[in-house]
């Protein structure tokens, strides 16, 4: 039955498949962000009490997450734009503005390549300690 309205993007199974994966990723990133917020609060409390032992761990986690999350976010917005076809370019879709805001995070607060390198350096340090038999947990 034709109503004269253009079908919504989610009316198409292929587009729905592409977009719902991004929705699940968004939920995963949301709950990861909640945990990171908790970690930073715990770190702040420990540092105020004079214990900075977990600072390297939190730094390593945050560097890696920043690099991954900003990449996943910008790639996801671009995928949404593609799913919308030509309409995705329209300002009315909200996607060009959203992408413009998201793209800055790849370099704001540290370039993603540098963040990934810092996280990798942390992981290699942990690996070396683990292989060296250091079970102290100190990083």
Image (cartoon, helix red, strand yellow):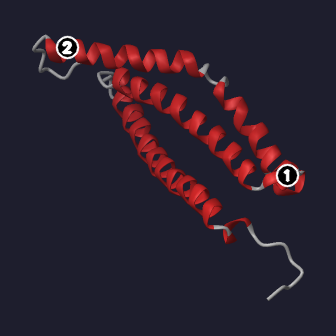
Position of 31 relative to 51 (above/below): below
- 68 left or right, relative to 3: left
Q: Where is residue 15 in the image (x, y as percent from the top left)?
A: 65, 60
The residue lying at 78 percent from left, 73 percent from top is 7
87 w.r.t. 79: above or below: below
Judge whether residue 91 can be spotted in this image: yes
Question: Which image quarter is the C terminus in?
Answer: top left
Count of numbered marks: 2
Q: Name the residue under label 1.
A: 86
Instruction: Please report the residue visible at 50 percent of the width from the left and 56 percent of the height from the top.
Output: 24
Q: In this view, does 1 lie to the left or right of 64?
A: right
Foreground pick, 139 / 80: 80
Label 2 belongs to which residue?
129
Q: Quadrant of residue 61?
A: top left
Looking at the rendering, in which quadrant would you find the N terminus? bottom right
Indicate the secondary structure of the residue bearing disc 2: helix
**Residue 9 higher or lower than 82, as above or below:** below
Residue at image coords 14%, 20%: 136
Pair 2/1: label in front: 1
Q: Earlier in the sequence, mark 2 or mark 1?
A: 1
Crowding near the residue tagged with mark 1, few <14, some 14–19, many ≥20 C-alpha atoms within 10 Å: few
Residue for point 71% across, 33% down: 103
Measure how far apart labels 2 and 1 are at the Cα level: 52 Å
């Amino acid at each position: 039955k034709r109503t004269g309205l253009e079908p919504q993007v989610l009316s198409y199974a292929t587009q729905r498949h592409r977009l719902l994966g991004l929705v699940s990723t968004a939920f995963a990133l949301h709950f990861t962000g909640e945990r990171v917020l908790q970690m930073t609060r715990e770190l702040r409390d420990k540092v105020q009490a004079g214990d900075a032992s977990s600072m390297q761990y939190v730094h390593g986690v945050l560097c890696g997450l920043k690099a991954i999350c900003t990449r996943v976010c910008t790639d996801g917005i671009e995928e949404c734009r593609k799913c919308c076809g030509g309409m995705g370019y329209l300002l009315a879709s909200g996607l060009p503005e959203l992408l413009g805001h998201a793209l800055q995070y790849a370099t704001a607060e540290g370039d993603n390549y540098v963040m990934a390198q810092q996280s990798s350096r942390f992981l290699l340090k942990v690996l070396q300690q683990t292989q060296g038999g250091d079970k102290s947990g100190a990083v």
